Image: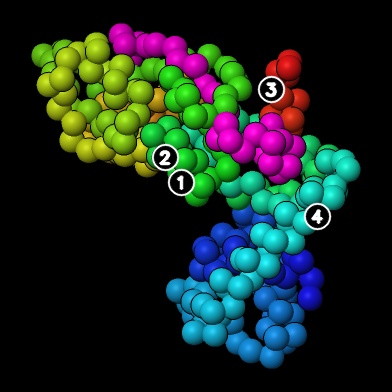
Amino acid sequence: MEFYHLRSFVVVAKTGNLTLAAKQLFTTPPAISAHIKALEEELQTQLFIRSSKGMKLTDKGEILLRKAQITLDSALELVNAAASSQNEIIGTFQLAVNQSPKQLKITRLAENMRENIPGVTLQVSSMATGKTIEAIREDALDGGYVYGDIPNDLFALKIKLQKITTIAPYSFHLTDKTIRQCDWITMGFHCPFDDFLKSKIGDNITSVMSCDDETSRLELVKSGLGLSFYEQEEAQIYANKKEITILSDLDFEIQLYFVVAKNRVNDPVIKALLQEIRVLWEIAY
């Protein structure tokens, strides 16, 4: 039984989709499908029910998933305990991002990992600051990018000072209304952007919707639903395409961090990832 067959099985079970699993494991759907098929043949049992809606575990698959996860975790712990260098570390790092992959250099990070820690794969999810912090505390995530103040139970690396601006529909003009009177698409779930907005225009914000996914928020602004905060560099791209209007009245800067749980900084996979993040962003020890 191959180690990567088990890893593919667990990721497909969690995502329910070959394409999503392939993206998380930085490979192709046919490769993941081949891993699953090989595992089913070796175990002589069907693990998934395949349909146009995705991959659903069979009853036997549900039972074996729990055992596969235990086996995977135990094997990773054993290998990493014996590892003498980063090249020998094996595992998966579940990473939360709050900007576009381009802004956070995710492609370069993956390339560096492939060279320096080839046994470690990334599972990337888009997530707002509040949710990321909560997920790390619950061990549902290994680490991620967050804005603002860092809780005492997290270890943080300073990444960059990020400029935030306000985006509005392209046809928007401040005439009869002030920004204080406009409809807003807020971020929700303890996002520091919302705290800043309240500090500037008060608690009586007309929030027509909360959305912590930046791509969805951009589309909602384009549709005319309201104003929202957005990273300045990304906003400028869409403003140049005449898809949105930038309002600079409330521009502010906020610190972006990369965080992990303090009690896990010596975990081999996390320790290796922290090193890659330092190299990626040229952060000194």
Q: Secondary structure at mark 1?
A: loop
Q: Is residue 218 above or below residue 81?
A: above
Q: Residue furthest top?
A: 249
| Kind of residue at disc 1 | Glu
Please give the residue where the numbered disc 2 appears in the rendered image.
134
Q: Secondary structure at mark 4?
A: helix
Q: Quadrant of residue 245?
A: top left
Position of residue 72 in the picture relative to residue 152 (left or right) = right
Task: Determine the residue positioned at 51% across, 83% down.
Answer: 58
| Kind of residue at disc 2 | Glu
Position of residue 171 in the picture relative to residue 101 (left or right) = left
Residue closer to the observer: 208 or 148: 148
Q: Position of residue 140 (x, y in %)?
A: 50, 49
Query: Mark 1 near mark 3, Cβ–Cβ under 8 Å?
Result: no
- Name the mark nearer the viewer: 4 or 3: 4
Q: Secondary structure at mark 2?
A: helix
Q: CA distance from mark 2 to mark 1?
A: 6 Å
Disc ID at residue 138: 1
Position of residue 134 in the picture relative to residue 75 (left or right) = left
Please give the residue where the numbered disc 4 appears in the rendered image.
79
Query: Mark 1 near mark 4, Cβ–Cβ under 8 Å?
Result: no
Please give the residue where the numbered disc 3 appears in the rendered image.
281
Query: Mark 2 near mark 1, Cβ–Cβ under 8 Å?
Result: yes
Q: Position of residue 108 (x, y in %)?
A: 72, 35
Q: Position of residue 252 (x, y in %)?
A: 39, 11
Viewer can see residue 28: no
- Magenta stretch encompasses residue 248: yes
